[in-house]
């Protein structure tokens, strides 16, 4: 393998927080007097910012209502939550099959690992700490730790800077076209991982070096 670093998105790339995210949407919609979205509607928003996800489902782009939704989500399952919803997010999130094995193989090969996600950094670190695998990550850049959300490459560039790597040395892996566009904007190679709702044809317009069916496929392709 020629890469010195392999960076990842989180949701539907390495982990699955669907039940907690769906609960946050349900509570946020209830606060606004809206019918709860279906789990499948919520699944199609995962990888977006909360404001964009709310607007995708409702067609409502009113910033004040986006803010009510965002605040309710964060106060229940998000970074400001302290009760059952927050426990659901941290303890109920599962790492996808092959995630631990892939990250461990990368660590053993001396390859630097990072997560660049729209999910808050503290949430991702808490999930990995709860699972006992925080040591498998060199760095986490959450959406709350940058000014511009993906596909803007700020988070990717920040990770490169912090780990002392050039874009040409790094593979970025993700499950959405947002991730593909982020890698393109940041100058990194991209590998799609088909763990989420985005199908392989959607990635064809974007530069990519591989489309992996799952994380085991990705590990095999990396020859780890």
Image (cartoon, rainbow, N blue to C red):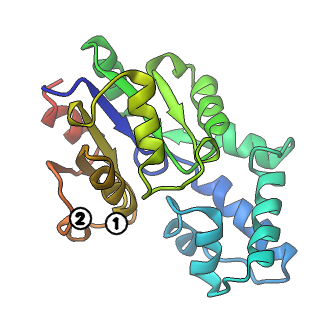
In the displayed structure, would residue 80 be above or below residue 31? above
Is 122 situated above or below 193? above
x%, y% of residue 139? 49, 26
Could you say which disc has been placed on residue 116 in the image? none
Residue in the picture at 34% in, 63% down = 177
Answer yes or no: do the residues labelled 1 and 2 have beta carbons within 8 Å?
yes
Most foreground residue, 153 or 127: 153
Give residue 110's quadrant in the image.
top left
SS under mark 2: helix
Can you tell which of label 1 and label 2 is closer to the viewer? 2
Q: Quadrant of the C terminus?
A: top left
* Tag of residue 203: 2
Drawn side of residue 112 relative to residue 132, left or right: left
Q: What residue lies at 30% left-to-right and 57% top-to-bottom? A: 180
Of mark 1 and mark 2, the one earlier in the sequence is 1
Residue that numbered label 1 is attached to: 198
- How packed mark 1 is, by other alpha carbons closer than 10 Å (few <14, some 14-19, many 20 or more), is some
Q: Quadrant of residue 73?
A: bottom right
Percent position of residue 107, x then y: 33, 16
Q: Kindly state the secondary structure of the residue where label 1 is placed.
A: loop
Q: Work out whether residue 81 can be spotted.
A: yes
Could you say where residue 222 lies in the image, as x and y percent from the top left?
16, 31
């Amino acid at each position: 393998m020629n890469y010195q670093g392999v960076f990842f998105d989180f949701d539907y790339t390495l982990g699955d927080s669907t039940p907690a995210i769906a609960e946050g949407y349900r509570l946020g919609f209830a606060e606004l007097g809206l019918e709860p979205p279906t789990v499948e509607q919520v699944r199609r928003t995962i990888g977006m910012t909360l404001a964009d996800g709310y607007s995708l489902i409702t067609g409502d782009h009113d910033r004040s209502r986006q803010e009510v939704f965002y605040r309710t989500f964060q106060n229940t399952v998000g970074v400001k939550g302290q009760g059952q919803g927050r426990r659901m997010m941290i303890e109920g999130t599962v790492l996808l099959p092959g995630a631990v094995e892939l990250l461990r193989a990368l660590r053993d090969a001396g390859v630097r690992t990072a997560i660049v996600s729209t999910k808050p950094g503290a949430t991702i670190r808490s999930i990995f700490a709860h699972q006992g695998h925080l040591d498998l990550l060199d760095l986490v850049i959450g959406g709350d730790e940058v000014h511009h959300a993906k596909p803007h490459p700020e988070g990717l560039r920040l990770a490169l800077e912090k780990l002392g790597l050039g874009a040409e040395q790094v593979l970025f892996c993700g499950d959405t076209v947002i991730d593909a566009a982020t890698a393109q904007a940041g100058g990194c190679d991209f590998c799609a991982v088909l763990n989420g709702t985005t199908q392989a044809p959607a990635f064809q317009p974007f530069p990519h070096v591989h489309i992996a069916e799952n994380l085991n496929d990705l590990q095999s392709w990396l020859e780890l």
